[in-house]
Image: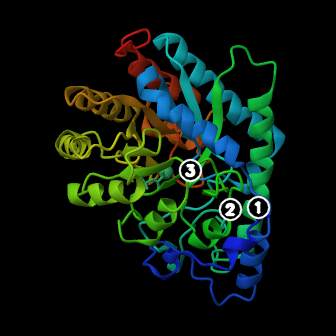
Amino acid sequence: MQLTSSTADFTRPGPWEDMPAAQQPDWRDHAAYQGARQWLASAPPLVTAAEIRRLRSSLSELVTNGALLLQMGDCAESFYECTPRHISAKLDVIERLGDRLGEITGRDVVRVGRMGGQFAKPRSQATEYQGTLEIPSFRGHMINSEIATPGTRNANPLRMMWAYDASDTVQRAMRAYREGTARVPATDGPWSSHEALVIDYESELIRRDPDTDDLYLTSTHLPWVGERTRGPADAHVSLLSSVANPVGCKIGPTSNTDDILRVCERLDPHREPGRLVLIPRMGRNQIRQALPPVVRRVANAGHPVIWLSDPMHGNTVKSRHGLKTRHLADVITEALRFRDILEKNRQYAAGVHIEVAADDVTECVGGPVETEDDLQRHYTTLCDPRLNADQATELIDAWAKGTVTGRRTE
Ligand code: PEP
Ligand code: CO
């Protein structure tokens, strides 16, 4: 009989265990470390192989169908915002923006939330100062607490179990929402996604599907590898290369095309449509120089990737008051430049990957948030500044306006 639980794979560590892995919590000596990993290894999958296959199949047809992809949600999810009220507010925003994009463009929209597991953050600075006290940076609720004291910033492996439980709550709500019969017309998603950052956590949630014998990462439908951890010979890329999920990869402005090609070769060796989503996040100015050579190399190598614009992470600035922010105008500019570049190179621009809050936050400047002075009104993000729904609507409208209405027929 096939083993559906982890037992078969748990005893067989993946090759990535011995590879370099950036941005990992320092917790292997913690008394709870082994126990937390074992607990995860015997936990049920958070998402099913059948669901993952459905998303992968939608993505494989996305380009030929002329459908669009909308991936959105918090920069970092919070354990405290996994209540029914918070989850349904987030799902409502995804639904509203997805519907709007679909209505204006006349295209199907595959919806993916940055939710149900987006609990770990890579950080450019390992520490920060509270006055004169240097403490570890916040790395997401899977790793430590946002509360700024030395003790609460220590990495705690028990948090992997709490992240699993929080994810389970969100995944169940998302499943109920997807399967809800009241939704007309039926839409695709919302599926879950997060950055597969913490190797200890993700490794333990790989399961073999008895029907196909393939390995799936069952922590989420669409895991992605971040700009800071996508080294082609590194652990994160190796882990994602071993599973059959559709996978994403962020691409920053300093990426070298040889490296990106190696990542494509690792993640999409069989050149399968729907397998790999490349997500440039270059900044509104750098994108003009940096993106075209990458697009051409990938296309010439025959990888049928889905190109998705993250117009936010390359446009982060500090406000006069010291808050991290982004200007909506820059975000829109990058998204439209992305689309132009893709079209000029005869590739399909599939949509956007954006950080959006369900609440009426004031974290980015633009639209109803007129100046940097307005940012302090409702600035609640755990990590990067998010658009509010009004600002995201402006972006969606700007994107949709340049999209030829109707399905592509070729
Ligand atoms: C993110 O998506 O929140 C993130 C950290 O992205 P990147 O890896 O592109 O910096
Ligand atoms: Co972010």
Snapshot quadrant of residue 165: bottom right
Relative vertical location of residue 222 with respect to residue 388 in this rendering, above or below: below
The residue identified by callout 3 is: 245
SS at mark 3 in the image: loop
Q: In this view, does 306 lie above or below 44?
A: above
| Picture disc at residue 207 | 2
For image coordinates 45% across by 18% down, the residue present is: 397
Question: In front here: 357 or 44?
Answer: 44
Label 2 crowd bin: few (<14), some (14–19), many (20+), radius 10 Å = many
Disc 3 marks which amino acid?
A: Asn
Crowding at mark 3 (Cα within 10 Å: few <14, some 14-19, many 20+): many
Residue bearing the label numbered 1? 4
Q: Do the residues labelled 2 and 1 touch (CB within 8 Å)?
A: yes
N-term mark: 2 or 1: 1
State the separation of the CA atoms marked 3 and 1.
Answer: 17 Å
Left or right of 270, for residue 80:
right
Q: Which of marks 3 and 1 is in front?
A: 1
